[in-house]
Every structure is written in C-alpha cells, then in structure tokens.
Amino acid sequence: MAQDSNRVTIVHGGTVVTTDGPVRADIVIRGERIAALMVDSDGVQADERIDATGLFVVPGGIDAHTHFKEPDPNLVEGFEMGSKGGIAGGITTAIEMPQASPAATTGQHIRDKRNLIPRASHIDVALWGGVVGQPQEQIEEMIDEGIVALKAFMPASSPGFPRANDVVLHDTFKLIAGRDDLPFGIHCENDDMLTAGIERLQAAGRKDPLAHAESRPPMVEVEAVHRALFFAELTGARIYICHLAAADGFKLVKEARQRGVKVEAETCPQYLVLDHSDLEKHGPFARCAPAFRSRDEVERIWEYIYDGTVDVVSSDHCGYTMESKEAGLDDIWKAPLGCSGIQTMFPALFDEMINKRGQTLERFVELSATNPAKVFGMFPQKGVIQVGSDADLAFYDPQRSWDVRGKDMLHRNKWTPYEGKTVGASVVRTILRGKTVFDSGQSNPVVGAPGDGKFLPRGYGRDGANAR
C-alpha cells in the first residue's frame, strides 16, 4: 500500500548509521523515500515527527534467506504471519525461498507467489527460483518473471524439491554465465556423506540431539563448497553460498575470491550466537541444516566476520508447527530440519556484534542490509540511508534487553531456539517506505497491515519505481 507522496515524516534526535558511519542527523522522509539528512530539522514542517533520542537508526534489515512457504495450504507459515515476525525484528525486506506446495520452479509458480505479496505481506518481498533439474526453459521463465536468484540443494531436501546432481549444477551455472545480475545460491552439503552419517548413527541406536550434529560435521559442507566453487569458476557464473556454517568453507570462499571467482557467502545467527549446548538443550527445536556447531567452530567463523569474508547474515527462517517439531523430542531424526529466526535474528546479531564483541555499526549494517541489497540488485534503493532511497528504517535501543520466549513471537508458530536467552538490544520501531509498521510503544505494536509490502523484481535498485 503506497504512502501519500506529499506526506512528510521527520525522524529526529537519533544516531543514524550511514555509509560514512554513525552520525547525529535528522531524516526527512517525503512519501516513501528519504528526502534529506539534516543536522537540525526544527524549521521543517512535517505531518509526523518521530523522536529517536538514544536510539540507533539503521537501514531496514534485508533477510536474504527465509522460508515462508507460500503458497502455504498446510498453514505452516505464509507471507502474512512470517512477515509480521519480520517487522518486529527490524526487517523490511525478505527474499523468499522456493520451497512451498508446489515448489516455485516455473514461471507460473513465480507469478502465483508474486500476486500474493501485495495482499498478504507486511514487508517487501523478492523471490528465489528453484532449480530441481527441470527443463532450462522453465528456469528462463522464472528469470523473466523477476526472480533475483536461483536456488539448488546439493543434499536431498523437502518433498517436491529433489537435490541437484552435478550435471544440473554445471548446466545451470553455464546457463547463467555472463548474467552478473543473477547469483546461483547453493545449499552446500555432501549428500552421500551426510546420508551415511545418519545411517551409521541410527544403526548405533543414537537419537539424541547431538547425533544430528555428528551426522553432518563441517567437512560435509566443506567438500560441497569446494565442488560448487569449482563449477562456478569453470563457467564464470556468480555463486552464492547459503547459510555456511564451516570455517574451512569460508577459507575456500576467501581463496576463490582472490582468484577472481564471483562468489558471495552468507551465514546465520544460529552459527554465530548458538552452539552445541543449545542443540542439546532445545533438541528438535534446534534441528536445522547445517547443524549447530561447536563453540570452537563458532569462534572460527567469527574470524571471517571480522576480516570481511562473510557478506550476508540471514535467518534461514523456517517456522514449522509445534506438533511437527515435538515429534523429535524422543527421537531427533523425526523432527523436520529448520529453525524459526526472522524475529530474533538481527537483535541477537546486534547484541553479539556490537554489545559483546565491539564490532562497528557499519559492519552490522553491511551484513544486515547494505550487502544483501547489493548482492540481490536492490542497492541503492534498499540497504542504505541516503537521499532518494526507500525510507526503510529500523530503530535499535542498544541497552534495552529482553528475554526471548516463544509465546511472544509474532510469527505463526510460537517457538524459538533462543528460548530463555536474554538479548541485550531491541528493535523498538520499524518503518517500511515511510510508514511505521511496528512500534513497541503501542499496546498492539503491529501498526502496519497485510498488504503494506510489495513485490520487488530483479533490478529494483536500478529502477525501484517500477516495482510491481
């Protein structure tokens, strides 16, 4: 739902994180876009003034990897409920993965999903297209419908989304070679190795939570990353390594980048904040792929945050029902793979990066907004606070702590692998294209509505006014 193009909103008193770093500035918003950054806006007439004193104002978060599972006939999540959790976590844009019923693997599937967004979503949404070995003409149809990236699984995935073998991977990389606007995202795990790991542990009678992590150790990822990078380098295509949770995998990414390979890589907060102890504690509610890592591995991954190798932090949000997760309480193998995380992701990352590890606000913004906007063709319309950009803003109180409880989550299914943890930073307001959609100061903090969001086609950063 578009904002009145003449409406003026001023955000004043806050610390604004721009590409030049944090500055004390007022943000003047006209309609849906940022009209000015000013030292003092007292003389400017406005329809609304928002006091951000004591807060950090950053670009709205972009979740580059989320599973709302639309179309969603089984009511696992859906755009409406999933995106409601997003606005509470400072997220203004999500890029929806293709696993759904049916999986999004044709142009018609993309059209169907695209048409749901302006009716159901609280936030803006772009789309991934699935690669499952279908005719290449169907991949080209999805590209024509505006997807921002392709996605394949090297291991077996959900029903309707078979793994991509090496022929499919190579041929898809070859198809998109020369298209620098279209990365190919890969879930990198060696299917043979993890399948054998599961079978061996099951044969030994293991069904405890840590058996899940032991079945797919970091080297299962590292081998697959090596193979995927080989195909990307061979063809010259862009590759995006999804949710990488192995430090040696990031080492390969860094080395490939130095050779000129067009590679970007993401990780997730569950591999930066949580570890094996959380898997032991929460069992099926912490079962995801890749698995939670040891504390030593987590610290090694942080080294690649520090040196700039990690491009993006995403949620890999996958909000399965309580009932499906509880099936794994006595047998970890019975729980589906996936963790909810869209609401907790960026507050937890902010707390860990800024409050605990002393990293810069600029690096937080790179990982949460600017880099995903650049990787997926939304920059500079998204991912940055500057004149002309969409007025997508998240307001952080760096000292307002909160105890994470599943029952408080705004997404559909009320569980979280962060249950019981204290997060030392909070999102107190979220603005989407000039409109406040979340305000923690209200009795009902969700002040936006389904349909506030819109579909973002590939190239939105170049010609954002043409978004459908």
Image (cartoon, grey):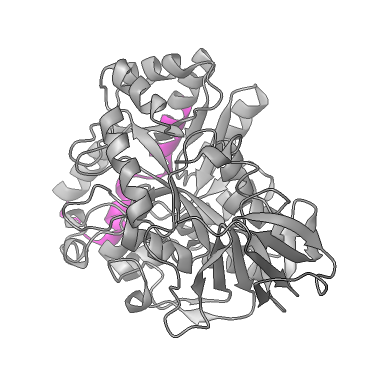
- Seen from the viewer's position, the closer of residues 111 and 21 is 111
Which of the 4 image quarters holds residue 318?
A: bottom left
* Residue in the picture at 75% in, 69% down: 15
Query: Is residue 360 visible in this depiction of the protein?
Result: no
Q: Where is residue 289 in the image (x, y as percent from the top left)?
A: 34, 48
Query: Is residue 207 visible in this depiction of the protein?
Result: yes
The residue most toward the bottom is 443
The residues colored magenta run: 204-226
* Residue in the picture at 33% in, 54% down: 119
Taking the magenta stretch, the answer to whether it contains residue 343 is no
Please identify the quadrant where the N terminus is shown.
bottom left
Q: Position of residue 153 (x, y in %)?
A: 33, 34
- Seen from the viewer's position, the closer of residues 258 and 99 is 99
User: In this picture, is 403 found above or below 268?
Assistant: below
User: In this picture, is 406 found above or below 236?
Assistant: below
Taking the magenta stretch, the answer to whether it contains residue 211 is yes
Please identify the quadrant where the C terminus is shown.
top left
**Magenta residues, dominant SS class:** helix
Q: Where is residue 204 in the image (x, y as percent from the top left)?
A: 17, 50
Q: Where is residue 323 in the image (x, y as percent from the top left)?
A: 16, 66
User: In this picture, is 140 found above or below 278?
Assistant: above
| Image label count | 0
Which of the 4 image quarters holds residue 190?
A: top left
* Residue in the picture at 23% in, 32% down: 162
